Amino acid sequence: MQVESSALTEPARLELVKRVCAYIQENPSSKATLRSLGQRFGVSPYHLQRVFTEVMGISPRRYVEECRVALLKLRLAKGESVVGALRGTGYSSPSWLYKDSRSKLGMTPADYKSGGSGRLITYATGDSNLGRLLVAATSRGICTVNLGRDDGELLETLRKEYPKARIVKSRSPADLLSGVRAHLKGQEVKLPLDIRGTDFQLRVWKAIQQIPIGSTRSYSEVAAMIGEPSAVRAVANACGSNPVPLIIPCHRVIRKDGSLGGYGLGLPRKRALLTREKSMAATHSRGGSV
């Protein structure tokens, strides 16, 4: 017997979506459809589509694809061939991936499989009032910004992100660190970036860069800015995947009710950044220097 979404209480709706997500995550390579998911969970395809999209901000079909892409990335990172990884993810033809690999992987399959092989990445570390700061860059621009307790922790994280790249310490650390430190002081500095992201993530990150210092936007407002008002949770995920926080200011994105939400560098740092930026904006509006 199938249940209509209007007959479900809010806790029941959330529980249904939680169970559907868990099933998709456990079976990412299966050819799950609205009809098969509806039959499994006792809800009509129409109402499953409606409830899932309202709760998650994306359709079940898109969620299935995101899970399959995550599995594909894992297989490629482990060294599987592109064809083998695709088959293990449930795709019989590589045309699905090569048709638009940047929007799916953020780069070509070969580049993703290489794990940064052959790339030269220079990095520098230094002190900041938010903790130890690491900035890393390729010849094209900054690829990683991170904060941590010590240099060893920061370098280990960088090597995990680019396991096959040649990573060397910069001979001119001040050149790498100065731009990010300027951002921390509220200065408008254009820094070249070399970041990996899907088409959706890049659109979110571009929108976030339009948020003025001292201001905030909700996840739903950012979703509306990129023309996908229902993709609120996907926007939050994109914020969490931002490889260059402090440059792309995801700390300026908060929940609709005014609470901070999550932040990859930790909520205390998010709170500190927002407090400092509001003070800078107030000083600037009074005609003072920042």
Image: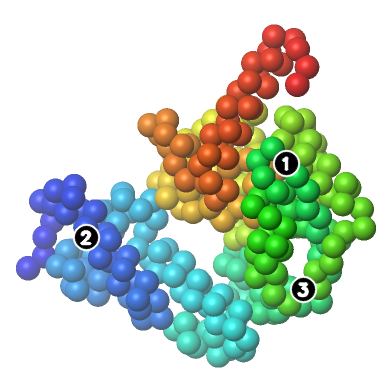
Q: Amino acid at mark 2?
A: Leu
Which residue is under mark 2? 16
Where is residue 287 shown, x and y percent of the image? Answer: 74, 10
Nearer the observer, 93 or 178: 178
Residue sitting at 81 percent across and 55 percent down?
124
Q: Amino acid at mark 1?
A: Ser
Position in image of residue 235 (x %, y %): 49, 48
Q: CA distance from mark 2 to mark 1?
A: 45 Å
Q: Nearer the viewer, residue 79 or 44?
A: 79
Looking at numbered disc 3 in the image, what kind of residue is underneath it?
A: Ala
Residue that numbered label 3 is attached to: 165
In the displayed structure, does residue 1 sit left or right of residue 139? left
For label 3, count other residues whose C-alpha is less than 10 Å away and answer few (under 14), some (14-19) or many (20+). some
**Label 1 Cα crowd, 10 Å radius (few <14 / some 14-19 / many 20+):** few
Percent of width and height locating residue 88: 48, 87
Question: Residue at coordinates 69% horizontally, 9% vertically from top-left?
Answer: 286
Tell whether 165 sits left or right of 26: right
Residue extending furthest left? 1
Q: What is the distance, in whole Å, between disc 1 and disc 3 at their CAs?
A: 26 Å
Find disc 1 in the rendering and name its residue.
Answer: 128
Q: Quadrant of residue 23?
A: bottom left
Q: Tell me which label, 3 or 2, sits earlier in the chain.
A: 2
